[in-house]
Amino acid sequence: MNCLAARRTITTDITDKSSAFVKHVAGCPTCKSFYEKQLKFNSVLKKAVEVDVPEGLASRILVEHNLHKKKAGTQKYRWSAVAASVLLVFAVSIVSTFNSPPAIAGVIMEHAHEELWILDDKGHVTLESLNQLLKPHGVRADESIGYATHAGNCIIQGKQGVHIVFAGKNAPVTLIVFPEALDDAKSVRISDHFFKGVLMGTNQSTLAVLSEDEESLKIFEARLNASLMTFI
Amino acid sequence: MKDNTHQAGLVDMTTKEQGFESMVHAYSKDIYRYGYWLSKNSAIAEDLVQETFLRAWRAIDSLNDAKAAKSWLFTILRRENARRFEKKSAQAELTTLDDDMMEVFAVVEDDFANVDNMAVRSALRQLPASYAEPLVLQVIGGYSCDEIATIIGAKPGAVMTRVFRARQKLRKLLEEDEAKLASI
């Protein structure tokens, strides 16, 4: 190793323990001096970078973690409680509009409950990303669809769908795209003890809009109708 | 039989909980500091840390090697911070270090041993994020350029360049600062 290479290493990767580097620094007084000065500068830098950490940070993280777990547990329990009667609930809620509940409704509801934690996501998904996800399903949205906090592909009963969460007026609104069209219905109201929602059919997929809050759901439905431009 | 399964589940859960708690105690300070230097704001840094650990818990089953936990957490925090800006990692790659850039090392520079923390912090705040980030990772995490490249999703050569330029700029800012003080 020559001086230039040694100095490159000292400046960019001072922790390098390769024998060539160690040997060169030990045998070259100029590089050794440079190395020692750089080490000193590193310790100055380390002190400066180590800003004070807010008191009790670890405890607050653990409190938040426990609250989150409790919340998830409650939601799970809520879902477990309705699981036994879910068919009945679907039957009751859907029978007013249709003679038999579409099987897709159960599949989508189950998926939404499995991924309840997504509702807490505080990210932001751009319209471009949303449309990339929606494109394979023959759907396209414009900016009036609203602020998405989470979006991703997901596997629903072995098929690739899309799971998006939007910020709603009082509660988040979930949009699930399932790659299977509704049999003979264009729009079906569904609900269980947690979600209220609507299934809408396109030629190649089913869109499910779900929310805990009816007002948020209605506002989003209107936005969705105005925003979705292409139903192929 | 059912009880045993339940018991095993509880044991797993307890181990997982303990692992998570150890992780919080061991790494939250460094993760906060990384968040602080990314956001340059203590409140945002704390939010980023909270989000990072919430996500880490959800995905803890995917962490196969406990030794990789720290860099895994750095990566999660980095993504969380990127979400704040709605930007994807579309940072332009810098070229690798040229030998002529290294001419600067012909002279052994001052060691800045007497520079105070405030001056260094002020200089660090003035660095462009793409330079400061790998430098902070190197100083806080003790990572090599290869490891930093993995965390921030860049090429090792680009990381070397950024670290080099960060140090170079930092020195320049500190020299200017010293000159200002001397002229008073």
Image: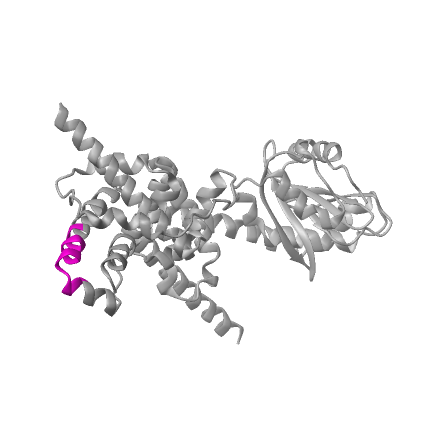
Position of residue B2 measured from the top left corner of the image (x, y, whole percent): 53, 73
Asked if residue A29 lies left or right of residue B63, the reply is left
Give the image location of residue B144, x and y in percent: 32, 58
Q: Residue furthest top?
A: B184
Q: Nearer the viewer, residue A124 or A34?
A: A34
Q: Is residue A12 rendered to the left or right of residue A144?
A: left
User: Would residue A58 appear left or right of B60 to someone viewing this image?
Assistant: left
Q: Which residues are magenta?
A: A25-37
- Is A28 contained in the magenta span? yes
Q: Residue at x 73, y 32 (%)?
A: A222
The residue sitting at 74% across, 37% down in the picture is A228
Q: Position of residue B85 (x, y in %)?
A: 48, 38
Magenta span: chief secondary structure:
helix
Tell me the quarter of the image containing the C terminus of chain B: top left
Residue B52 visible at all = yes
The one nearer the camera, A76 or B27, is B27
Judge whether residue A69 is colored magenta: no
Quadrant in the picture for residue A199? top right
As displayed, is residue A33 above or below residue A48? below
Residue at 47% over, 45% down: B92
- In the displayed structure, B7 sits above or below A210; it is below
Tally of marks: 0
Identify the image's colour scheme: rainbow, by chain, secondary structure or one colour. Answer: one colour
Image position, residue A183 (x, y; %): 85, 52
The residue closer to the viewer here, B84 or B110, is B110
- The answer to whether any part of residue A56 appears in the image is no
